[in-house]
């Protein structure tokens, strides 16, 4: 969607970067408050939906899930921007050559795109794997 032409595209791209621009300590403290078992927003929502009180940050498994959720929320915009840059750097001639070589039409163009996206996501995944700094 970030690569498509539409009105307000720059605004959507800017809004997409907000979680990434928030300092890590601020995001960690905000999510710690949201996951708090006494007055947190997320635990209150879970209590209202399931009528069961959850202590998300007390148990190791759910605490780890919460940290992973915060890390995904914080780093997804970075991945989206890098993926967008990778997609915009692919020349259109590459897709045209793929359609000519394989003579499959759109399927070959999507195959070329899939190979490029998998390579970009692999590189980003390796970079984000070592970037595990959100703590609560």
Image (tube, grey):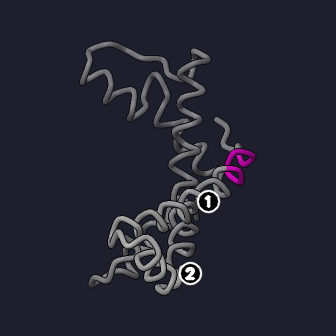
Q: Position of residue 35 (x, y in %)?
A: 48, 31
Q: Nearer the viewer, residue 72 or 96?
A: 96
Q: Nearer the viewer, residue 81 or 11?
A: 81
Q: Position of residue 100 (x, y in %)?
A: 42, 79
Q: Which numbered disc covers residue 119?
A: 1
Q: Is residue 12 left or right of residue 56?
A: left
Task: Tell me what residue is drawn at x 33 percent, y 70 percent.
Answer: 106
Q: Is residue 61 left or right of residue 113?
A: right
User: Does residue 98 belong to the magenta stretch?
Assistant: no
Q: Position of residue 129 (x, y in %)?
A: 69, 45
Q: Is residue 117 left or right of residue 50?
A: right
Q: Which numbered disc covers residue 89?
A: 2
Badge 2 marks a residue whose secondary structure is: loop
Q: Taking 39 as reference, is 77 above or below it?
A: below
Task: Tell me what residue is drawn at x 57 percent, y 15 percent.
Answer: 59
Q: Which numbered disc covers residue 41?
A: none
Badge 1 marks a residue whose secondary structure is: helix
Q: How busy is the neighbourhood of tag 2: few (under 14 within 10 Å), some, or many (20 plus)?
A: few
Q: Taking 66 as reference, is 4 above or below it?
A: below
Q: Quadrant of residue 45?
A: top left
Magenta portion: prevailing SS class: helix
Q: Which residues are magenta?
A: 126-131
Task: Tell me what residue is drawn at x 33 percent, y 73 percent.
Answer: 105
Query: Which quadrant of the figure contains the N terminus?
Result: bottom left
Q: Quadrant of residue 104?
A: bottom left
Mark toward the start of the polypeptide (2 vs 1)? 2
Q: How busy is the neighbourhood of tag 1: few (under 14 within 10 Å), some, or many (20 plus)?
A: some
User: Does residue 130 belong to the magenta stretch?
Assistant: yes
Query: Which quadrant of the figure contains the C terminus?
Result: top right
């Amino acid at each position: 969607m970030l690569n498509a032409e539409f009105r307000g595209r720059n605004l959507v791209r800017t809004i997409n970067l907000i979680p990434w621009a928030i300092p890590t300590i601020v995001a960690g403290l905000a999510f710690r408050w949201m996951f708090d078992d006494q007055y947190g927003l997320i635990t209150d929502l879970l209590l209202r939906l399931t009528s069961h009180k959850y202590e998300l940050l007390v148990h190791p498994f759910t605490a780890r899930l919460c940290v992973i959720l915060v890390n995904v929320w914080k780093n997804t915009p970075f991945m989206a921007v890098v993926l967008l840059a990778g997609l915009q750097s692919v020349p259109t001639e590459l897709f045209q050559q793929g359609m000519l070589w394989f003579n499959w039409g759109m399927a070959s163009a999507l195959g070329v795109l899939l190979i490029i996206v998998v390579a970009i996501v692999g590189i980003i995944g390796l970079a984000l794997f070592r970037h595990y700094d959100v703590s609560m």
